[in-house]
Image: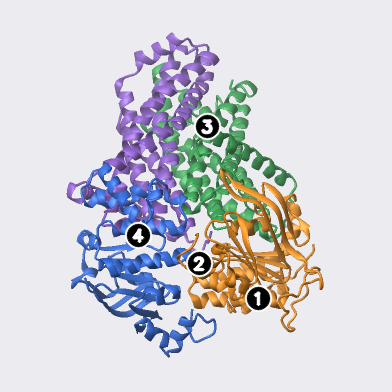
Amino acid sequence: MSTAEPGWALPAILGRRTLALLSQLGGLALLARDLGRAARPEAGGLDRVELVRHLHRMGVRSVPVIAATAAFTGGIMVLQAAPFVEQFGAKDFVGFFATFVTFRELGPLLIGLIFNGRVGANNTAELATMVVTEQVDGLRALAIDPVSYLVLPRVVAMTLTMVALVLVGDAVALLGALGVAQVLLDVSLAQFLDSALSRLETWDLLVGLVKALLFGLGISLTSCFHGLRVRGGAPGVGRAVNASVVASAAGIFVADYLSTFLLP
Amino acid sequence: MILTEPVPPPDPGPPASPAASPAPGVAEAAVDLHAVSLAFGPKQVFRDLDLRLEAGRVHALIGPPAVGKSTTLKLIAGLMRPDAGEVHVLGQRIDDLSERALGAVRERMGMLFQNNALFDVSVGENVAFPLRRIDAGLTEATIRARVSERLAKVALAGFEERQPAELSGGQKKRVGLARATVADAALVLYDEPTAGLDPVTSQKIYDLVRGEQRATESTAVVVSSDVAGVLTIADHVAMFYEGRVVFTGSPDEARASRVPVVHQFVHGTLEGPL
Amino acid sequence: MATAFPSPGSLAALRFQLRELVKLTRRTLEMAVAPRRGGRAARRAFAEQMHLVGNRSMPFMIVTMAFIGAIISFQTALQSQEILPDLSQVGATFTKLLVRDLAASVGALPLATRVGAGIAAELGSMVVTEQVDALRMNNADPVETLVLPRFVACVVMGTVVLVVGGFVAFGAGVLVGQVAFGIEARTFASTALLNGGDVALGLAKCATYGGAIALVSSERGLSAFGGSEGVGRATTEAVVGSCFTIIVLNVLLSTGGHFLLPAL
Amino acid sequence: MPIRFANVHKSFGAKEVLRGVSLTIEDGECFFIVGASGVGKSVLIKHLVGLLRPDAGDVFLDEEEVSRLSEHALRPIRKRCAMVFQSSTLFDSMTCAENVALPLRKHRGLGAADALVEARRRLAGVRMEGFADALPAALGDGLRKRVAIARALTLEPEVVLFDEPTTSLDPVSARRTDQLIARLCRDDGVTAVVVSHDLSSIFGIADRIAMLYKGGVRFLGTPEEFRACDDPVVRQFVRGEAEGPMEV
């Protein structure tokens, strides 16, 4: 890593970072605009073959790791609640506490982070590899628009997949929480379900899904953007993936924060 | 540390004849692979491969793509281990050595990698790297002198402070070459030293390989797809085909070979078994 | 490295990776206890990695942890409103949750994304450009020269970053309590429920996660193969592997903590 | 489709690669662009299909000014003018047949299944029918190159650009590739523009040769003239000598 940056004065650093951030946001906006154009049928439209392939690769094959994450998360939530349950004798609340936090907050957030690591990073790596090995130029030379052929199906597939995975994850997390509550805190199945169902509203679940949609869109755009922008051979691919997952993770937290406060 | 002991100091005397070897009389083997078998997953690369490369010569390893030429170099360097069989290098069996014990053998070897494998530090530091690792006792001034002497030899004098990323393909190759030979290795391995280079640049690299080997009376093993080019500097050729060595001999013998695969490969004709 | 790879994603591959990870962990710890050769280059490598893990991740982590703190505080307050009408305990609860678990466990995920991807990308590209082989040819053990500095840096600076992040999250939480729920900062910033066990458990988690990120990512990076595609794959697997390892370790440490360092 | 470069300049950062290249390539020619590594041969031909744009100067294809067209307007040009890249650029997530089927599916309006059938037929044309279901990663460089050629030819282009088609191939595969290119020009009337520094290819199949040196055209003529040229730089290149005036 070279640290040959042109200055370390605070204003310089701040200025550089702001510029970098703005150029990234600008690039994302341009990509989004190109996507809009690419979606029109005369530009090629959505490639169905690619869409199905990506749905399978991104969705079906992510289920195990997402399910495992969700199960552990559900368990951890109850584990963290344990001292308070014991202190305040709030057994009736365990079910609600675990499901509410999982549905609204931790489910989408953790699944988003894992999805970013698995699918987003993979996507950047794949596109970046296609760029550095000139496969993208190869597409262009075949008169095929890379945005309509490569980016559009990926964005659609990732967004759909993310929402579906959060639904799956919510269900599995519920089971994980249930198990731990029963074993560790001696909360019965009926007690758990009763507390969850009586207090939980559909809206709580929907908030999580809206977040999932936002994260999916954000991750897919960011990962495609960084993948297509790569420079400099094999090391460049690693750097692109690194930049992409970091930017997406930051985006996830910002989006999560905003939606937590905007969606009551 | 064995630094200077096995290698005679660079001798600017008359170039040794191809047959010359460190132990006159008996031609000593720098590399001896005996009954080596190796598989990558289901793919069998070698089965009972035998290969003997005499010391003090330039050996060319040729053959169609993916027949295990580069793999052979990695076996010799101890970077890979055979599934079965023995690998002897510079008089020592290395296939059963620990990574640490291999170190002593590797100090007498140099390797030019296909992708050059230059580190992300300056050209000077790249070339100095083997010196710093081998003998902690060398003074900074000695190291610097040897680095600039070596860079001058590959026509890159004054490039010490440059970064590898700024260099052209041929220049990177020469830095890699300087790094592989800076510690006066007794055995230097070259993996595709001219891949992707034009004929003029290729010939310059070959001349450097040959000149270095002659000056230090070391052993050079060159893997190359550029058959015509590598035959101009080799003393001895081994051709690989379907996991075996199908030919060994001098370049002239290779050109004159009646074995169909060898003939077709060396002459690049379209009709034949390949 | 290894000559036979089981097909990726299979159980055999997972077992294989785990075995490699255990091997690497053992060798790194051996090296850490008995350093062989020091010298200027080694010291520089350590300093460089410390800088990379510490200073270079700090801005990202501070931003992320501020959002996390705000979200957790918001949710905790919302939850406790359901259980107890009185909000005086929210701050203490929040603090305890943060110290005992969330600062480390939630903070470690973005850290894994940032640092893990970086390590795997760098080591992976060194492998596919044969630089690791070149190191070995020059008697420089990759574990000693590459993995050990990253491991130490991640344990030390990872802890530092997560602790700083914890304070930032705490500050953000206090702010949200004040603004959104009208809880006096003095009431909110309470350590009433905190004990030594919480602090010990929190710190143990920070250090463990840091080490895990370094080891998982290094192992993935060093086992990269096959050009730029391989680097991308290694980076992806490092992020997912690190996140997943953190979640599993969290379950183990939290369960252990539940019995050894009780919360109350 | 005649091709004309008019005073093309191109720099990358501070590095000036092309400093005024002017060339005309006639219909149906097998035209070689040769020169040392890094002299800008690939850069030059990428201008023809709009993958790069000149800093100054113009590139004409059939009197159409390629260098001024938008990415969208370039599409008809790219259908008539195919390119075979040095690295083959096969899509590595698809089988060989799927690779060849892609342009058919996209531009000929064939359904996925029909495209695959047609793709297999095309692969048979380069003697690759046995590898239709193999992934490109499983093939050697020489075989990959043949699939790439089949893919480039799917739309029956009038011009095919070859970027170092024989680099890193062993001698036998290299001569096979030469033969394929020669047949395209002789039998199908295709214009082939070949970037290469492989002397055997150059003297084997070229109709005319342009040698680039220091950003300009140093030599232009037939193979016989190339061999007989008394310019020391050209002579050094033709003989592949290490010593000489050529700066590399």
Judging by colour alone, the chain drawn in orange in this rendered image is B
Do the residues at discs 1 and 4 belong to one chain?
A: no
Which residue has dot 1 on it?
Answer: B150
Looking at the image, do the residues carrying marks 1 and 2 touch, with CB atoms under 8 Å apart?
no
Residue C54 shows up from this direction: no
Viewer-side label of 1, 4: 4
For disc 3, the neighbor class at 10 Å (few under 14, some 14 to 19, many from 20) is: many
Determine if residue A26 is in view.
yes
Which mark lies nearer to you, 3 or 2? 2
x then y, percent, for residue B230: 58, 72
- CA gap between label 3 and label 1 equals 52 Å
Q: Amino acid at mark 1?
A: Arg
Instruction: Depth check: give the residue in front, B191 or D200.
Output: D200
Marks 1 and 2, the one that precedes in the sequence: 1
- Return the residue at label 2: B165
**What shade does chain A have?**
purple
Q: Which mark is residue C117?
A: none
| Letter of the blue chain | D
The C terminus of chain C appears in which quarter of the rendering? top right
Residue A233 lies, in percent from the top left, at 46, 59
Where does label 4 land, which residue? D149
Which residue type does callout 4 highlight? Ile
